[in-house]
Amino acid sequence: MNMPLKYLIKNIVLILVALLITGCARSQVNPQSKISDTPTSIIGFNHIGISVNDLDEMLSFYQEATGFELVKREKISQSKNADLLFDTPNISYETATLKGPNMLLELTQYSNQPHNVMTKMPPQGPGMTHTCFQSPDWDSGYHKFKKAGAEILSRGEEPIDLGGYGVTYAYGYDPEGNMMELEQVAKERLPMDSTWLEANPLWMTQVALISPDLDELDDFYEMILAIPPAREGKYDNHPRLNDVIDQDSSVILATWFSMDGLGKMLELMQYNNPATPYTTSENRPTDLGYSFSIEVGDIQQEYDRLIKLGVQFLSEPMILGEFWMVYANDVDGNVFSLRQATSPQSIYATKNLLKLNRE
């Protein structure tokens, strides 16, 4: 399937502008690359967002499955800043914020969005197909999500060992069809001490974006983050990976950008078999499914920098609650936002989330 012409033209222009400004082509993979090396004010991931049909049901599911603390639940309406931020007049919504050890999980129900039935996202995408929850293998997140009612996609009755290196994997779906990855990690691979793990037996690690053109999406996020990817891989008909994604004869390309601590990664993937289809539209923040935010130290500086690189935002940065925020789309139409806490002491700022302790 060929890419629609208007998106092809837009994406070519965006990448050409980036190359003219940065004066360089795509860098090589660098295993030492990490977000703390960026010359920008980017800090890392702040939150994973899910736009939902039924907030009560989804909140109950994720509280049971994760054990994360509900730190805020609020309704927003008749807000000029919200109308501008979402580019939607008279927007009204309710959001619930769960605090994990290293990231926030925000569930939002928009009242002026028609009630839609979200179909299950296939592993090959396109779009943001999943986030990842990690746990120690002796206190398995897989079994917690399954007990809470997750529908497991992966084959078999237990998470799958891909290569004997101390991590098992499974994919599953929440009650509205959003996919999640569940990774169970052996003790020798965990950098945390037993006290920390007892208090925090589950944490979040990934934003996973699946694209029909991995090179183009990789170039875009290398431009945004101003660091090269730390890993890349090709997986050609890996039998146990086939079991994880419930697809035979899979061929997958991937790159990873190392983000801010505790295994947080930006995972970019392209399925060649089954092929990731091209998208035909840009997502909006109110659309059902996933979005994510990149926390920054200076939102105006990053907004100005990315405008010059050709990124199109829905608005200028606005204050909404505890954050300065602004929404944008990447070259595949995925929704992301920039965030800056209005106060350095905010409990919602990444640096103030629970710290990692080591033995």
Image (cartoon, rainbow, N blue to C red):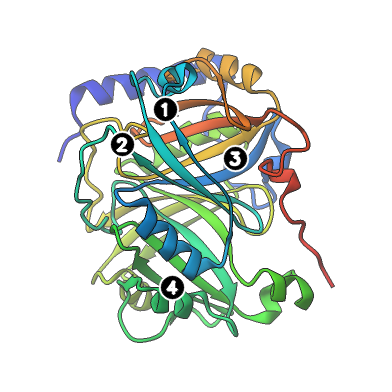
Label 2: how many residues lie within 10 Å, few (<14), some (14-19) or many (20+)? some
Q: Earlier in the sequence, mark 2 or mark 4?
A: 2
Question: Mark 4 falls on what kind of element?
Answer: helix
- Label placed on residue 111: 2
Question: Mark 1 falls on what kind of element?
Answer: loop
Q: Earlier in the sequence, mark 3 or mark 1?
A: 1
Question: Mark 2 falls on what kind of element?
Answer: loop
Q: Which residue is mark 1?
A: 77
209 is higher (above) or lower (below) than 154: above
Give the x, y percent position of residue 311.
45, 20
Q: Residue at x 52, y 67 (%)?
A: 66
181 left or right, relative to 12: right
Compare residues 305 and 111 and report the one nearer the observer.
111
Give the x, y percent position of residue 40.
68, 27
Compare residues 72 and 34 and report the one nearer the observer.
72
Q: Earlier in the sequence, mark 2 or mark 3?
A: 2
Q: Residue at x 61, y 30 (%)?
A: 323
Q: Furthest residue to the left? A: 1
Whole-angstrom CA distance, mark 2 to mark 1, is: 10 Å
Look at label 2 and name its amino acid: Ser
Q: Earlier in the sequence, mark 2 or mark 1?
A: 1
Q: Of discs 2 and 3, which sits in the foreground?
A: 2
Q: Which residue is mark 3?
A: 228
Whole-angstrom CA distance, mark 3 to mark 1, is: 41 Å
The C terminus lies in which quarter of the figure?
Answer: bottom right
**Camera sees residue 107:** yes
Give the image quarter of residue 175: bottom left
- Label placed on residue 145: 4
Q: Are marks 2 and 3 in contact (CB under 8 Å)?
A: no
Label 3: how many residues lie within 10 Å, few (<14), some (14-19) or many (20+)? many
